[in-house]
Image (cartoon, helix red, strand yellow):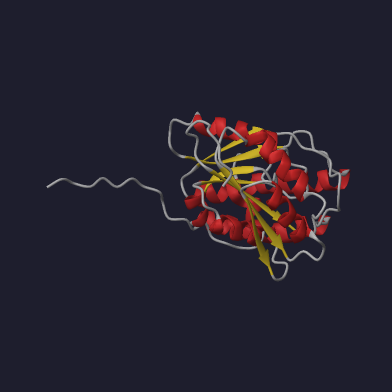
Amino acid sequence: MAESSGPSIPELSIVVPVHNEADNVAPLVREIHASLRGSITFEVVFVDDGSTDHTAESIRRIAHELPGVRLLRHSRRCGQSVAIVTGVRAARAEWITTLDGDGQNDPADIPRFLHALAQDQTGRLKLIIGHRRTRRDPWLRRISSRIANGVRSALLHDATPDTGCGIKLFHRSTFLQLPVFNHMHRFLPALFQREGALVLSIDVHHRPRLRGTSKYGLFDRLGAGLLDLFGVHWLIRRAPPLVQAQEEAF
């Protein structure tokens, strides 16, 4: 992990799933270091999800330049959710931040997530997720996300305006209790709430993609997302009641 002399905020593992993002990984690591160095101890865990370009080589080069960078590789492409699960399982910190590997999430927002976590007085806040009020995406992608978010919100009532935002902060142990399935990363608020956790949305910056191309199309998001949505709805309806048990003293 990258060392710091900062306050006693929870140590952090930053998990970044990547597929064919060779030109984006080094700028992203430099931004992470610029945002966090000196304030918290952190590591950056890249999960190369079957890239066919020079993504792995780019990660190795930046790992020699800056500390705290790790690389895990899938032998074939498994999808973003599986890559996130791989990274979280390998992470060494209690709290996880995820970032998309395309550079559209701004690492400068991470300290605001940590500040929001530090303000929690309940101990139940386990997921903080970004809300991209101003999207820097093509219009078709914005519309598809708006439709998906509207349908999801109406069915799951998860009180989260933007579940597709890649920048999140969450409790590792709680995440590892969740059911694992393809596209689960799109439903984390509902899944965390199913575990009795509090979820908070905060506004974040969103930037246009400067390098590389998007790996997801309109029907990748809407088609598979609708099937998963009904599955998550079933999981929530079938969840056992969350009750407090008090032990008797003898």
Number of callouts: 0
* Vertical side of 68 occupied by 51: above or below: below
Q: Quadrant of residue 30?
A: top right
In this rendering, would 201 be left or right of 9?
Answer: right
Q: In the rendering, at what x and y percent does residue 204 appear?
A: 70, 34
User: Is residue 223 visible in the rendered structure shown here?
Assistant: no
Q: Residue furthest front?
A: 64
User: Is residue 214 visible in the rendered structure shown here?
Assistant: yes
Q: In the rendering, at what x and y percent does residue 129 appear?
A: 62, 40
Q: In the rendering, at what x and y percent does residue 6 appear?
A: 53, 31
* Vertical side of 80 occupied by 160: above or below: above
Q: Nearer the viewer, residue 187 or 204?
A: 204
Q: Nearer the viewer, residue 154 or 148?
A: 148
Q: Residue furthest bottom?
A: 75
The residue lying at 55 percent from left, 58 percent from top is: 90
Q: In the rendering, at what x and y percent does residue 89 appear?
A: 54, 58
The residue lying at 49 percent from left, 39 percent from top is: 10
* Vertical side of 48 occupied by 151: above or below: above
Q: Quadrant of residue 49?
A: bottom right
The residue lying at 86 percent from left, 53 percent from top is: 213
